[in-house]
Image (tube, helix red, strand yellow):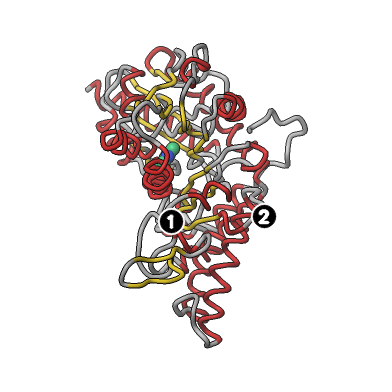
Amino acid sequence: MVESIETEPVPLDVASIRKDFPILTNREGLVFLDSAASSQKPTQVLDAMRHYYEFDHANVHRAAYDLAEAATNALEGARRTVARFIGADDQSEVVFTKNATESINLVARSWGAANLGPGDAVVLTHLEHHADIVPWQQLAEERGFEIRWIPLTADTQLDLTDLDRTLDGAKLVGLTAMSNVTGTFTPVQRIVDAAHGAGAVVLLDACQYVPHAATDVGALGVDFAAFSAHKMCGPTGIGVLWGRRDLLDSMPPFLGGGGMILDVRTDGFVPAELPAKFEAGTPPIAEAVGLAAAIEYLEDIGLDRIRAHEARLTAYALRSLTERFGDEITIHGPSEPDQRGGVMSFAYRDIHPHDLSQVLNSHRVCIRPGHHCAKPLMRCLGVGATSRASWYIYNDTEDIDALADAIGESGDFFTI
Ligand SMILES: Cc1ncc(COP(=O)(O)O)c(C=O)c1O
């Protein structure tokens, strides 16, 4: 997981990175601080998708003409790129889905339905996004297993005091690698070791992690990992489920239809091998090409440099917002910058997050108000909603300053 950076990587050239993102030029003065919801897209990704449609598009697999082979090669090449990027040994362990939400539902509906029943337990944390809560609740209603929760400390780190008891008899742990609300990093390896010791598999929600730091699913020892392309400079409409081959092999198909079978007869069907077994229907081909281009783009910059850049911005934001607003601002989450990623939820005076973000919008500062699909975490924080700013490779300290200025002006606005 994220480790302290001993030799500082070369800082990002943010001015030059910004030129890769047409939207930052097309919408002059935009201060985009909502990448945790979805990142912007560089020309390299847009060009790769356009090139695919202009030169290589046909439907994939089972065709005898060159164009369809080119499209198949594009899809399977993208799968190899994803596998390499996350340290997977075997590209057939990479399943393309619609998004991380579908990836987690796939595990719940396939692995969960085959393995969970009365007397079993699934363990989740209070940091989870609804995408890693609701599928388990839906299944628990049908299958009658228990859901247990890992609680939080006051600064939103996982409280592992009772971990062994919580894991006793558990069959699956659903764990986010980083909170999309507070930015808290979780101790993935420690939980993986404890979960495996208890006989449980671990599903890592890596949505907020893979875009921001080097990720190696083998080294982490997780059993499943889910993430979405649109948060890492890639297109919407494609997500990834990575799973250990033996687990995926043992699981029944999730969706049925074309592409996921070896044979179909009137009395039944035989599922295809991995990964086709889990990819019913026409896959997101252009989106896979875009995801591969996004990965190459991020790799060219360097994941260690990206993490160091975000850590610098996080430290700057914590310091500058606290110095400027003192007791008037409450920043949720860990106070140490190295314990959190580039996401910051805060409350300013008693201004409602929706009001605050509307005033910020009038200064072209885009942040996100609301519960961020993490209502159990909102209850732990004792709030109904937060204001959330999040940064990425195209943000710099000027954006944090613009945020601070706009927050200051909103204070004036609401005082009048
Ligand atoms: C931690 C986390 N998990 C899951 C999701 C769901 O991602 P998607 O909407 O792309 O399926 C998100 C999206 O915000 C997230 O931040």
Q: Nearer the viewer, residue 131 or 47?
A: 131
What whole-number distance in Å separates the C-alpha atoms at marks 2 and 1? 25 Å
Is residue 118 depicted above or below 307 in this figure?
Answer: above
Q: Could you tell me which residue is drawn at 58 percent across and 73 percent down?
A: 73
- Judged from the image, the secondary structure of the residue bearing numbered disc 1 is strand
Q: Is residue 162 left or right of residue 337?
A: left
* Residue indicated by mark 2: 300
Q: Report whether residue 104 is seen.
A: yes
Displayed-image quarter of ligand 1: top left
Quarter of the image containing the N terminus? top right
Q: Position of residue 295 (x, y in %)?
A: 59, 55
How many residues crowd mark 2 within 10 Å: few (<14), some (14–19), many (20+)? few
Q: Does the closest atom of ligand 1 sit within 8 Å of the Cβ of label 1?
A: no
Q: Could you tell me which residue is drawn at 47 percent across and 76 percent down?
A: 53
* Residue indicated by mark 1: 97
Q: Is the C-beta separation of discs 2 and 1 under 8 Å?
A: no
User: Hey, which residue is sitting farthest right in the picture?
Assistant: 7
Q: Nearer the viewer, residue 202 or 42?
A: 202
- Amino acid type at mark 1: Thr
